[in-house]
Image (tube, rainbow, N blue to C red):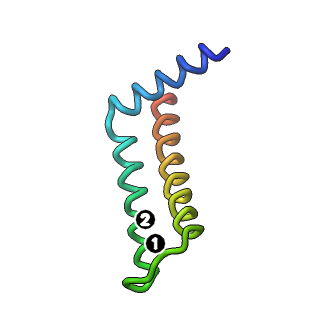
Amino acid sequence: MLKRGLTIAAKDLRLSIGGGQGLTQAVLLGLLLIFVFSLSRPAGQLVEPQAASAIFWLASSFGLVLVFNTLFSMEES
């Protein structure tokens, strides 16, 4: 069962990297979200570690949703 899962993961990774669009879009979305969250703080004020980790996980989650949506649309066609 692990071999089947690795085969599917390798196929999805090849599709994602081969097209170049899904991974690039996810990285750009993550960077954009981090930038927007950085604008919500006054200039020069440090971000608490808990807030920084929340921003990181939100950006990562939205990026993964974008990647999975792209992979699902590739599977449908």
Q: Residue furthest bottom?
A: 42
Identified at 53% across, 17% down, the residue is: 7
User: Disc 1 marks which residue?
Assistant: 37
Q: Is residue 43 visible?
A: yes
Q: Position of residue 39 (x, y in %)?
A: 40, 78
Q: Is residue 39 left or right of residue 9?
A: left
Q: Position of residue 11 (x, y in %)?
A: 46, 22
Residues 27 and 50: in front is 50
- How far apart are the two marked residues, 1 and 2, measured between alpha carbons? 5 Å
Q: Is residue 43 above or below residue 2?
A: below
Q: Is residue 25 left or right of residue 58?
A: left
Residues 74 and 25: in front is 25
Q: Which quarter of the rendering shows the N terminus?
A: top right
Does the residue at mark 1 contact the one at mark 2 (Cβ under 8 Å)? yes
Q: Position of residue 18 (x, y in %)?
A: 33, 29
Amino acid carrying label 2: it is Ile
Identified at 51% across, 46% down, the residue is: 64
Q: Alpha-carbon neighbours of circle 2 within 10 Å: few (<14), some, or many (≥20)? A: some
Q: Is residue 77 visible?
A: no
Q: Is residue 4 above or below residue 57?
A: above
Amino acid carrying label 1: it is Phe
Q: Secondary structure at mark 1?
A: helix
Q: Which mark is residue 34?
A: 2
